[in-house]
Image (cartoon, grey):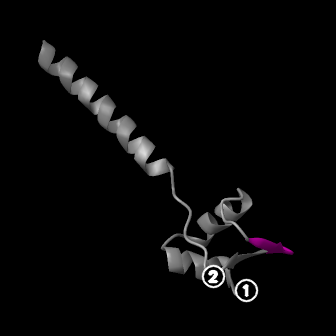
Amino acid sequence: MEYLTVKEAGEKWGVTPRMVNYYCSAGRIPGAVKKGNLWLVPADVEKPDDGRSSVKKNKVDSTQEMRTERFFEK
């Protein structure tokens, strides 16, 4: 099996090496192996979903809608 370094996986997925390191530490990349202080990511693994952005966007949109409704009620 071929492995990529954290830096190589980050370039492939368009994220920082620190984010890939986080995914590995959190167990979100199946087959990732830690050798000493270095994470190795399987070359054929897809980038894990980033669940942060969609939740935050929806929360901001609903808050903005509530503020707009209150403004126009008066």
Q: Earlier in the sequence, mark 1 or mark 2?
A: 1
34 drawn magenta: yes
| Residue 35 percent across, percent down from the top left | 84, 76
At numbered mark 2, what does the secondary structure look like: helix, strand or loop?
Answer: loop
- Determine which of the numbered discs, if any, sits on residue 1 in the image: 1
The vertical placement of 67 against 58, above or below, is above
- Measuring 68% from the left and 66% from the top, which residue is drawn there? 21
> In the shown orientation, is residue 47 left or right of residue 61?
right
Marks 1 and 2 in Cβ contact (< 8 Å): yes
- Measuring 62% from the left and 68% from the top, which residue is drawn there? 20
- Measuring 17% from the left and 20% from the top, which residue is drawn there? 71
Residue that badge 2 annotates: 43
> In the shown orientation, is residue 41 left or right of residue 65?
right
Q: Nearer the viewer, residue 67 or 42?
A: 42
Q: Quadrant of the C terminus?
A: top left
Q: Residue furthest bottom?
A: 2
User: What residue type is disc 2 on?
Assistant: Ala
Q: Residue furthest top?
A: 74
Give, as a single range, the part of the protein colored magenta.
32-37
